[in-house]
């Protein structure tokens, strides 16, 4: 509750007819309140003060400079609890008269949002920022940069509260103006938030692409770029197996910086279609976030599903056909589940093959499933050609040695071969 001395002083100032005396009196009263009170008493007296300077008897013309001074002094308060209590009340007092004090209202709400965030109350910070007037009817110029800055801050607050739905709604607002935003920091925050939202909603392939783009921004510190690259690799590993993921893995594998990330080992194995062992999967899982370990409809985690699908693809590179029971043993699941995953991947064109349910066998069809496959097949063909040439040269060398060292034996064998 406000001090009776302060309320009495404020009441007298409201009825003072001399504008200069009233202005000086209010400035002195505010100084007195800030220096004489603390805690809840300070909050109560600040609330009484702003109610007084916004009274109808003061008038907008005289209230504006007093409110400007209040907002300036409010921003310098060190007690965060006082800032939240007094700021929230001040916003409520301003609400019916916001048309006349749009800039003051905006500044006050930004400071109040800062106080909420310092208190790790990101929801109230977002709600406060959402009430800022961005489409001014009073000639106040609100640029696309200013709008995007507010929307991005709201988006980040909701992400801190693990609320991707509300975060996405404000990210979409930024998306409508991002082409005209010139502030580099806002643009980078947009990219990062887009990646985080896709990640939290398990759109891992889109998240990987966003993180990868972010990792190439030179304005960001090298350490943060590597963190973005690591996040991109993690999301690519968790994405559904198939040609689109293979292309993304190819981009990451070819990135020279990938060898500096902890995820390089599993990236290499997946890119080269090698089977993943349980120990490797467990080591990778230890670094995942909570939403990346969430259960899917069949009771497995996103990682379990991604690894199983990858190992199924890797198996298709090793075998032309395999019994379902043997496939299940390789994948670490029963035959029915192995069949279910194989059927789903074949149906969605992420695996080329067919299932013979009568014999209980999966048949794999050789095909270039993705751009990476073309690179690998070309490399493998050249390797094969080189091996054939080397074998032919070695046979010729051995034949020459035999002819020279064992001439009699060579002629008998050669004669017998000719006769046959």
Image (cartoon, rainbow, N blue to C red):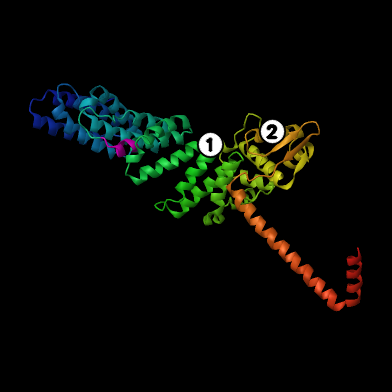
Quadrant housing residue 192: top left
SS class, disc 2: helix
Quadrant in which the N terminus is drawn: top left
Q: Is residue 19 left or right of residue 68?
A: left
Q: Is residue 145 magenta?
A: yes
Give the percent coordinates (x, y) of residue 296.
62, 31
Q: Residue at x 35, y 29 (%)?
A: 130
* Residue 347, image x, y percentages: 65, 33
Please state which of the two labelled residues, at mark 2 or mark 1, is closer to the viewer.
2
Q: Residue at x 48, y 39 (%)?
A: 196
Q: Residue furthest left?
A: 18
Say which label, 2 or 1, has the lower sequence index.
1
Instruction: Identify the residue at horizontal 40%, vertical 42% (top origin).
Output: 189
Magenta stretch, residue numbers: 142-148
| Circle 1 Cα neighbour tier, 10 Å, few/some/many (<14 / 14–19 / ≥20) | some
Q: Position of residue 206 (x, y in %)?
A: 51, 39
> In the rendered image of this protein, does residue 16 appear above or below residue 246?
above
Task: Work out whether residue 163 can be spotted.
Answer: no
The residue singled out by tag 2 in the image is 343
């Amino acid at each position: 509750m406000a001090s009776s001395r302060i309320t009495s002083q404020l009441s007298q100032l409201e009825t003072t007819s001399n504008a200069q005396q009233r202005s000086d009196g209010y400035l002195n009263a505010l100084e007195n309140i800030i220096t004489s009170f603390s805690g809840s008493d300070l909050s109560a007296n600040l609330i009484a003060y702003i109610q007084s300077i916004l009274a109808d008897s003061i008038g907008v013309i005289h209230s504006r400079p007093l409110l400007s001074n209040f907002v300036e002094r409010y921003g310098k308060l060190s007690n965060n609890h006082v800032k939240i209590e007094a700021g929230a009340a001040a916003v409520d007092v301003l609400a019916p008269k916001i048309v006349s004090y749009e800039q003051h209202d905006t500044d006050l709400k930004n400071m109040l949002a800062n106080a909420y965030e310092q208190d790790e109350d990101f929801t109230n910070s977002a709600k406060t920022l959402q009430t800022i007037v961005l489409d001014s009817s009073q000639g106040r110029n609100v640029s696309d940069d200013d709008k995007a800055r507010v929307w991005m801050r709201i988006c980040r607050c909701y992400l801190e509260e693990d609320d991707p739905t509300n975060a996405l709604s404000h990210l979409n607002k930024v998306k409508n103006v991002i082409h005209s935003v010139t502030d580099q920091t806002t643009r980078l925050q947009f990219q990062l938030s887009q990646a985080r939202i896709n990640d939290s909603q398990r759109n891992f392939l889109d998240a990987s692409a966003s993180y990868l783009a972010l990792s190439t921004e030179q304005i960001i510190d090298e350490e943060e770029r590597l963190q973005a690259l690591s996040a991109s690799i993690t999301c690519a590993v968790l994405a559904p197996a198939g040609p689109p993921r293979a292309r993304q893995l190819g981009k990451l594998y070819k990135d020279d910086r990938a060898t500096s990330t902890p995820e390089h080992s599993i990236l290499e194995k997946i890119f080269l279609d090698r089977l993943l062992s349980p120990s490797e999967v467990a080591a990778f899982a230890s670094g995942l976030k909570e939403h990346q370990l969430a259960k899917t409809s069949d009771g497995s985690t996103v990682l379990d599903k991604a690894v199983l699908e990858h190992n199924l693809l890797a198996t298709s590179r090793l075998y032309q056909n395999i019994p379902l029971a043997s496939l299940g043993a390789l994948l670490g699941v029963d035959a029915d589940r192995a069949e279910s995953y194989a059927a789903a991947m074949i149906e969605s064109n992420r695996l080329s093959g067919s299932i013979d349910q009568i014999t209980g066998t999966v048949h794999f069809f050789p095909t270039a499933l993705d751009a990476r496959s073309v690179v690998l097949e070309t490399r493998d063909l050249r390797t094969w050609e080189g091996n054939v040439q080397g074998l032919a040269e070695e046979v010729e060398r051995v034949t020459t040695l035999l002819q020279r060292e064992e001439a009699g034996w060579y002629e008998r064998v050669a004669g017998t071969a000719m006769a046959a």
